[in-house]
Amino acid sequence: MVEKRQLLYEGKAKKIYQTDNPDYLWVEYKDDATAFDGKKKGTIADKGYYNNQISAILFDWLKQKGIDNHFVKLLGDREQLVKALEIIPVEVIARNIAAGSLAKRLGMEEGTELPKPVLEFCYKSDELGDPMINEYHIDALELATIDQMNQIKKQAWEINKLLVDYFKEKGILLVDFKLEFGVHRGQVLLGDEISPDTCRFWDAETKEKLDKDRFRRDMGRVEDAYREILRRVKGEVD
C-alpha cells in the first residue's frame, strides 16, 4: 500500500502529494472553481468528487483502448493514485465545435460544427495566462522536443476520435477539451484530468451545457451538470 506524504503542490483544482514511492503521486480533487485565469473564484459542491470519479472512469476506458496514461487507481471519493510525470508545459486543446475563445477569435457562431477537428497549443503558465503558441514557439522555447510533440499530436488525435464516439453513445457532444501530457520513465503519457472542468459537454438533443461554462457564465445548476456527466459515463439510465 502506498503511503501519502507531504503536499508537493496545490493548484486551482487539485492538491498533489508525494508518496513513499517516487514513481507515484497522490492526487486530491478540490471543490474550488476558478475561471478567466483565476479572476472569478467560487465553489462547486462536490466538484472534487465528480471530477475524480469521471476522470478515473475515462482514464481507465482509454487504457482499455490502447491509450496509456498516468492513472493507477482510485483511492477514495476524491483521491486517486497516479504515475509521477514530468509535465510538458504545453496544453493541447482539441476542438470539434466552435465555442468559447475559438468562436470569438474567428467570428464564428457558437455551436458551428467544424469541418475537421482542430488542435491548438497553449503555453502552460498561470503567470502569463496560458497564451496560445504554435510548434515553432514550442521548439524555440524548448518546451518539448519534436519527437515528443509528434507523440502528443498522435495521441491527441486518437483520444479525440475515441472520446467523440464514446460520448456520442452517451447522448453528449464533445465540443472541445484540454489535454496535458508528461514524461514517465521516458514515455510520453496523458496526465491531468478529463472532466467537466476541462471539457465542454453539450447534451446532443437539447444542446444544454453540462460543464464549467455553467459556472463561467452564471447559468446556475452547475452541480447538476457535473452530476449528470458522471451518471452518463457510469452508464446509469433514467
Image (spheres, rainbow, N blue to C red):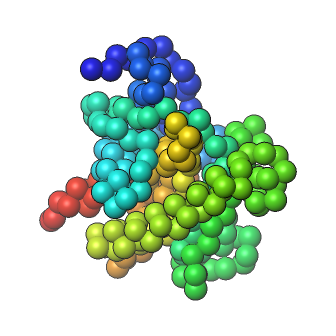
Q: Is residue 123 left or right of residue 141?
A: left
Which residue reaches farthest left?
238
Q: Nearer the viewer, residue 182 or 100?
A: 182
State whether residue 22 is above or below residue 172. Answer: above
Q: Nearer the viewer, residue 197 or 135?
A: 135
Which residue reaches farthest bottom?
115
Point out residue 83 in the picture as x, y percentages from the top left corner. Answer: 44, 35
Q: Is residue 231 left or right of residue 238?
A: right
State whether residue 221 is above or below residue 102. Answer: above
Residue at 50 percent of width and 53 percent of height: 198
Q: Is residue 191 left or right of residue 205?
A: right
State whether residue 139 is above or below residue 39. Answer: below
Residue at 71 percent of width and 41 percent of height: 125
Kindly tell me whether residue 82 is visible in this rendering. Answer: yes
Count of numbered circles in the view: 0
Q: Nearer the viewer, residue 14 or 103?
A: 14
Q: Is residue 137 left or right of residue 230?
A: right
Residue at 37 percent of width and 59 percent of height: 66
Q: Toward which corner of the image does residue 34 lie, by quadrant?
A: top right
Residue at 49 percent of width and 27 percent of height: 16
Kindly tell me whether residue 29 is visible in this rendering. Answer: no
Point out residue 6 in the picture as x, y percentages from the top left corner. Answer: 48, 14
Point out residue 48 in the picture as x, y percentages from the top left corner. Answer: 38, 38
State whether residue 63 is above or below residue 209. Answer: above
Point out residue 106 in the picture as x, y percentages from the top left corner. Answer: 73, 76
Please state, as top left, top right, bottom left or bottom right, where the N terminus lies in the image.
top left
Please state, as top left, top right, bottom left or bottom right, where the C terminus lies in the image.
bottom left
Q: Toward which corner of the image does residue 208 lie, by quadrant?
A: bottom left
